[in-house]
Image (cartoon, rainbow, N blue to C red):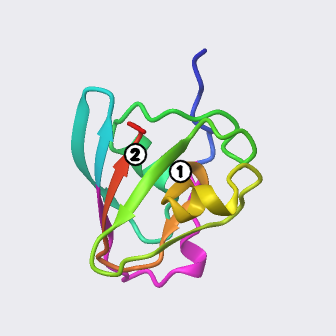
Amino acid sequence: MTNSIPDDNSAGDDSAATPSDAEPSTAHVFMEDTEEDIEWPAGKRLLYAMLDAGLDAPYGCTEGECGACQCVVEPHNNATTHMVHNNVLDEYDIADDMTLACQTLSDTPGGKFDVSYDF
């Protein structure tokens, strides 16, 4: 099944709630045979940062309802993230650094994260 990226250029962009001069985070993404560092702009959801970087990140509904974009995000140096919406993961998944890429924002300007779909 091929998914299409929503036509709305602001999809996954929550920058209205983020200072415009906030330093972007960096995500080191491990996906199948791909390993790449990408810029994760402040206020942009992780899934859209990966798609903007040309990665073929998995997703389905983009609403936090299906779990197709589930991945592990491991922060470095006390960096943090949060999910805007989640109807899939339970507290145990979240405690194991699982997140939904379509709903995840970096809370740490200049934060460094490892993102893996190999779990």
On the image, the x and y values in percent for residue 14 come to 59, 68
Residue at image position (35%, 35%) is 55
| Tag count | 2
**Residues in magenta, as a range:** 9-27
Quarter of the rendering containing residue 2: top right
Q: Quadrant of residue 6?
A: top right
Q: At 55% across and 55% down in the image, what residue appears? A: 99
Residue bearing the label numbered 1: 101
The residue that mark 2 highlights is 50
Q: Where is residue 38? Give x, y as percent.
A: 27, 52
Q: Residue at x 30, y 41 (%)?
A: 30
**Mark 2 near mark 1, Cβ–Cβ under 8 Å?**
yes
Q: Mark 2 belongs to which amino acid?
A: Met
**Magenta-highlighted stretch: main secondary structure?**
loop
Q: Is residue 98 above or below residue 82?
A: above
Is residue 16 shown left or right of residue 71? right
Percent x, y of residue 73: 42, 57
Residue 11 can be seen, yes or no: no
* Cα–Cα span, label 2 and label 1: 9 Å
Which SS class for mark 1? Answer: helix
Q: Is residue 6 left or right of residue 109?
A: right
Q: Residue at x 75, y 45 (%)?
A: 65
Residue at the far front: name it. 92
